[in-house]
Amino acid sequence: MATSRWTGTAETSSVSLRRRGPVLERAILDAALEQLSTVGWSGLTMEGVAAGAQTGKAAVYRRWPSKEDLVADALQAGLPALDEAPDHGSIREDLFQLCRRLRDALYSRSGFALRSVIHECDSITAERFHGVIVRRLIEPSNQLFREVVSRGVERGDVRPGVAGDLVFDVIPGLMMYRSKVCGSEWPDRDIAEMIDQVMVPLLSSRAG
Amino acid sequence: MATSRWTGTAETSSVSLRRRGPVLERAILDAALEQLSTVGWSGLTMEGVAAGAQTGKAAVYRRWPSKEDLVADALQAGLPALDEAPDHGSIREDLFQLCRRLRDALYSRSGFALRSVIHECDSITAERFHGVIVRRLIEPSNQLFREVVSRGVERGDVRPGVAGDLVFDVIPGLMMYRSKVCGSEWPDRDIAEMIDQVMVPLLSSRAG
């Protein structure tokens, strides 16, 4: 009933009344990401996010009972989906395109914020945000690497004997290592080198 | 001249006077590592280290002007040397033994302390301790991986075409990734799997 809805949101500002449901939610999540990029995890407040989204504090608290809940949702909403790996005709090109998408996710605004939040917050909260990395980046990309390799076996450019979980950790391992140790942001050229120097020899090998 | 030396060390306790030079230094460095393991970077004080080494604060400050200097030396002194990779007769066994030594260094008391210090201290100090990781772990192990692979090419169990820096980052990349993401401490069995599933196929491949 309309009247009761207006009563329920009476504390929000008149500006916010024009946006409801998903539109307002997106504005709040976006303001939260913006706050993370500018003032970081410690500086982010529910008030600041409300102000950034031009709404009232109550509109934020109604949806997210805590700063942790809000930030977890904001980070997840900001990450590009890793939900499919189209067939580009060869293992080399399939891996190249998939790595580019993973790189784009890692270096998206949300990806940057995710890493800096984990560095900044306490260890229990960090554990929760690690979960976001696992569910939204590690698990889906691992699944897609497996699909791409299976397709390569069917196509014939991947040796049938490829086995073991470790093979699927080589790319994320190299990406993490070079990012942390050399500060690499994985331009396309470096991705191509990784595929040509490491993944193609590893996957098309007849040894082992 | 003996008298001036006694004058110079007059503020140290009578216990410390029995140990000099390298012996006293080793006791201080060991006490610093012990403090890092128990009270961490924030809790470590020059006084606490002096007490742990049963010496006076001045004996510590005379050698290390700051906590950063002391901790950097303590961490370095505590890391096992990665200075040679003996020939075990095959690329598989050479890599296996080298990885075990790298793992032992990473999970030594100093290796653990190094990682926790970097997590705990401010970013400028962290930069300095990153330098310890690079100089004492990353660079020497990279050098040894290259030696082992060159020896394999000469021996004939590594394909001559192996090229590119990325190949030599696969092992440290996998070790870092699985340690961070799965909490793996790299038991021998996992090292053997990494060699058999990834490194042997990659290095003995005729593709690429």
Image (spheres, coloured by chain):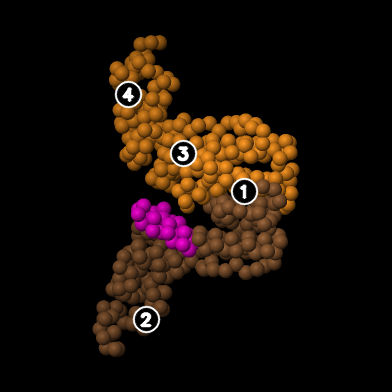
Chain colours: A brown, B orange
Q: Which residue is mark 2?
A: A20
Name the subunit of mark 4. B
- Could you confirm whether marks 4 and 3 are on the same chain? yes
Q: Residue at x 50, y 36 (%)?
A: B104
In the image, residue A32 sits, relative to residue B172, either above or below, namely: below
Residue, far front:
A161
The mark nearer the N terminus, 3 or 1, is 3
- Could you confirm whether marks 3 and 2 are on the same chain? no
What is the number of the mark on residue A127? none
SS for dot 3: loop
Queried whether the magenta region covers residue A42, the answer comes back as no
Q: Which residue is mark 1?
A: B198
Secondary structure mostly seen in the magenta stretch: helix
Residue A179 visible from this viewpoint: no
Picture coordinates of residue B128, whole percent (x, y): 47, 41
Kind of residue at disc 1: Val
Q: Residue at x 72, y 52 (%)?
A: B208
User: Magenta segment, which residues?
Assistant: A111-137
Picture coordinates of residue A100, whole percent (x, y): 60, 62
User: Of the residues tagged 4 and 3, which is closer to the observer?
Assistant: 3
Queried whether the magenta region covers residue A125, the answer comes back as yes
Kind of residue at disc 2: Arg
Q: Which residue is mark 4?
A: B55
Asked if the residue under mark 1 is in contact with the one under mark 3, i.e. CB atoms within 8 Å, the reply is no
- Could you confirm whether marks 4 and 1 are on the same chain? yes
At label 1, counting other C-alpha atoms closer than 10 Å, the crowd grade (few under 14, some 14-19, many 20 or more) is many
SS for dot 2: loop
